[in-house]
Amino acid sequence: MATTRWNSTLYSSEKFVEACGAVVFNTEKPAQVLLLYYSALDEWLLPKGRRNCNESRKDAAIREVREESGCAIRLRPITMTTRAPSDLEAADVKDIPRTYDSLTEAFMLDVRDLGKGNGVKLVWWFIAELDSIAGDGEAQFEPKFFRGDEAVKILTFQKDRDVLVKALELVGRAADKTTREP
């Protein structure tokens, strides 16, 4: 029997959970980003939560932001590099990073080891724009917008800071491209 060429770990469905979140930019004040304050633990977080059965990752991100913050959002098309092929490319296209415009795909994946043989949590991250404050979010979270550089400093966890820094880089690149075009 042959062995695989790659280091690999298999997880059956009871050993993994998927979550989806978004870095939400205020469209009226583009340099501002949504954070959630979780007072019970004195933590500042990016909005995210578990994906439901039969729900797309994109829909889960949109729903979770709405539930936690009360903010209605839409995914923001961005230019990004990905190894996923375009839907216009041949099925056997080479597996290499390519840059595409106007993607609303996840820009980052966090794989969290749940420890003690409990499996992993996969957190898919998207970039979004605020549509409106649609109502109240979950009572344990207080939503607040901050300047991007300020939000990086405020976030409690380094992984959230890393996600935000990458989102700011991608959105900043798009803004730079727009200001350079005639």
Image (cartoon, helix red, strand yellow):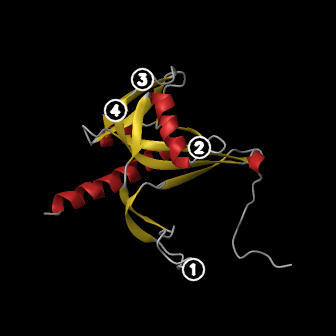
Number of the front mark, 2 or 4: 2
Q: Hey, which residue is sitting farthest right in the picture? A: 1
Which residue, given by chain and number where applicable, does mark 2 sit on?
19
Label 1 is placed on what type of residue? Answer: Asp
User: Within 10 Å of the Cα at label 1, are there few (<14), some (14-19), or many (20+) other Cα atoms?
Assistant: few
- Label at residue 92: 1
Reading the chain from its start, which is encountered first: label 1 or label 4? 1
Q: Is residue 72 left or right of residue 15?
A: left
Whole-percent x and y of residue 46? 46, 38
* C-alpha separation, residue under disc 1 versus residue under disc 4: 44 Å
As helix, strand or loop, the secondary structure at mark 4 comes to strand
> Are dots 3 and 1 in contact, CB under 8 Å?
no
Reading the chain from its start, which is encountered first: label 3 or label 4? 3
* C-alpha separation, residue under disc 3 versus residue under disc 4: 16 Å
Visible residue check, residue 176:
yes
Quarter of the image where the N terminus is located:
bottom right
Q: In this view, does 143 lie to the left or right of 11?
A: left
Which residue, given by chain and number where applicable, does mark 3 sit on?
135
Which residue, given by chain and number where applicable, does mark 4 sit on?
145
Of the pair 65 and 120, the residue shown nearer to us? 65
